[in-house]
Image (spheres, rainbow, N blue to C red):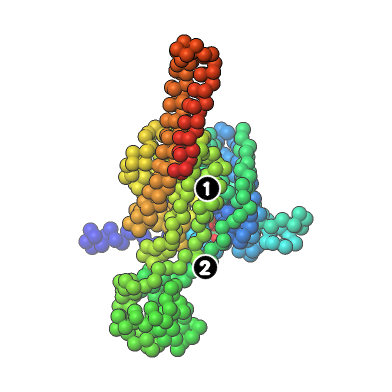
Amino acid sequence: MTVLDEILSREEFRGLSPAEFFYRNREIAGFSNPSRALYQTVRELVENSLDATELYSILPNIDVGISIVSEEKNIVKVSVRDNGVGIPPKEVPNVFGKVFYGSKYKLRQSRGVFGLGVKMAVLYAQMTTGSPTLIRTALPKSKNVYEYQILIDISKNQPIIVSNKVYKNKSKWHGTFVELTLEGNWSSARSRIMEYVKRTALITPYATIRFKAPGIEFSFKRVTRKLPPPPGVGKPHPKGVDIELLKQLIGSALANDNSLTLHEFLTQVFDSVGTKTALSFLKWAGYDPRTPISKLSISQLDDLARKMKNYTKWRRPKPHSLSPLGEELLMEGIKGILKPEFTSAVTRKPSSYGGHPFVIEVAIAWGGQIPASDKPILLRFANKIPLLYDEGVDVSRKVIDSIDWNLYKVRFPAPLAVVTHICSTKIPFKGVGKEAIADVPEVEREIEIALREVARRLKRYLSRIERQLEVKVRYVTISKYIGEISRALSIITGKDSKLFEKRLKLMVNQKILRKEVKVHETK
Ligand SMILES: Nc1ncnc2c1ncn2[C@@H]1O[C@H](COP(=O)(O)OP(=O)(O)OP(=O)(O)O)[C@@H](O)[C@H]1O
Ligand SMILES: [Mg+2]
């Protein structure tokens, strides 16, 4: 036996369940220490609650509670209650106890994407305190409230139902309540969590969020009852396909109709592909539009996928699967939370990268309660999720730092905040913790265009203020000499100095007023 044979004979091979993988590598999902884990738990629960309300046009009412169970052992209880659509009772165990299980694997903008978030919190609670997660839920008009206590069988990636009860739904409630007991450091997570809730309120001005934690109780009441229109479910764009996706799509299309032709397949299954576009593409790619898709060989599929990716004349993906906030709501949110003296927002037209539609929104806020700092305060959002960590590697920071703010009359330290929001069916996050956006050139470009637009508006505002200030300074300066001039005139003419004083004051006022009028006219 060679040394290599000996080593190999001792090696053991086995698979790893998704739950076990994330249990071992929890840092990549944001659960790296008791402080970060507490923040991440609040975030996962709040984001699920917001999805469960606004995706269904329900004005969100969300209650977040944090209490200390043991100060000495750093054990806290976190609960979040919402008025969303609830969860069908039979789905509750998998939704909370099976990694990669959820309802958001669709081409539609939502906060949730991976089917992972709440399971990470359940896993973390289970491994740090051994406690199951408590869930109560009721669908709209449900006569009952369903209660579960769930743990996860890590090696099998299966839920363990610790208890299961049914109550009468006396208050006709619908929504979901989740409570977890976990190791968490409230005092060190406190400021991040509060900032997170505050920024969530900014980007969801139509939500009421109540927050209760040791020594703190506050609520952000909705400042508007207007909700952005909910996103529709989109189709895949031909630019974003690969051979695997193509095989999957052909498989499900054939299950419905096994005589489907290539031309029919392209127009029925893909986004933004009409008859004309499909024919032009097939001509360019060298395929007969009448070919039945069931007859395509693997090498043809490979070729087709490559050509779909490389074809440059596809129309842009349709943006109906996106739900940006809109300029008006974004400014409402900013006014309600940052209380600035000036704000302006831009929602860009839809754009796309790699076949995924996206919309960039950028707003600027100046003065008022914004503290002066050495560079712009950046508030980043992706699909209405506030991003608080890893700002240094985010594309928005890169764009903001590349701008010469002198061009826009901003001299630091200045009370300047910039809000960036990217909406997409596929946010180019740098990791599953969803904290930073990668620098995709198309996204970077859109952010820069929007930022320069709002920066120009800020410049106009600052110029106006500057001119008003100049006028006031001039008035004060001139006024200082009125008394002296009046006395001199009185000596020369022998008339009462009060008369001159009155006339001169009137003249100065009229002149200054005329200037002020001019300043306003140039707005
Ligand atoms: N408060 C809630 N109300 C209604 N449904 C919920 C709620 N919380 C979770 N769910 C359901 O549970 C599923 C799993 O949630 P989970 O947070 O694990 O994943 P996700 O939100 O789909 O994606 P992500 O991993 O990005 O958070 C969701 O897709 C949703 O269907
Ligand atoms: Mg989630």
Q: Amino acid type of disc 2?
A: Val
**In the depicted view, which residue is nearer to us: 282 or 487?**
487
Residue at coordinates 39% horizontally, 75% vertically from top-left?
Answer: 246
Looking at the picture, how far across and down is residue 397, in whole percent?
Answer: 37, 45
**In the depicted view, which residue is nearer to us: 30 or 207?**
207
Residue 362 visible: yes
Report the mark closest to the observer, 1 or 2: 1
Q: Amino acid type of disc 1?
A: Met
Relative to 372, is 382 above or below?
A: below
**In the depicted view, which residue is nearer to us: 309 or 3?**
309
Residue at coordinates 45% horizontally, 35% vertically from top-left?
Answer: 515
Residue 35 visible: no
Q: CA distance from mark 1 to mark 2?
A: 27 Å
* Residue that label 1 marks: 331
**In the depicted view, which residue is nearer to us: 438 or 399?**
399
Q: Secondary structure at mark 2?
A: loop
Residue at coordinates 43% horizontally, 46% vertically from top-left?
Answer: 457
> Which label belongs to residue 243?
none
* Residue that label 2 marks: 233
Residue at coordinates 32% horizontally, 71% vertically from top-left?
Answer: 312
Mark toward the start of the polypeptide (1 vs 2): 2
Quarter of the figure with residue 251 = bottom left
Q: How many marks?
A: 2
Looking at the picture, how far across and down is residue 401, in whole percent?
Answer: 34, 43
Looking at the picture, how far across and down is residue 187, in whole percent?
Answer: 53, 34
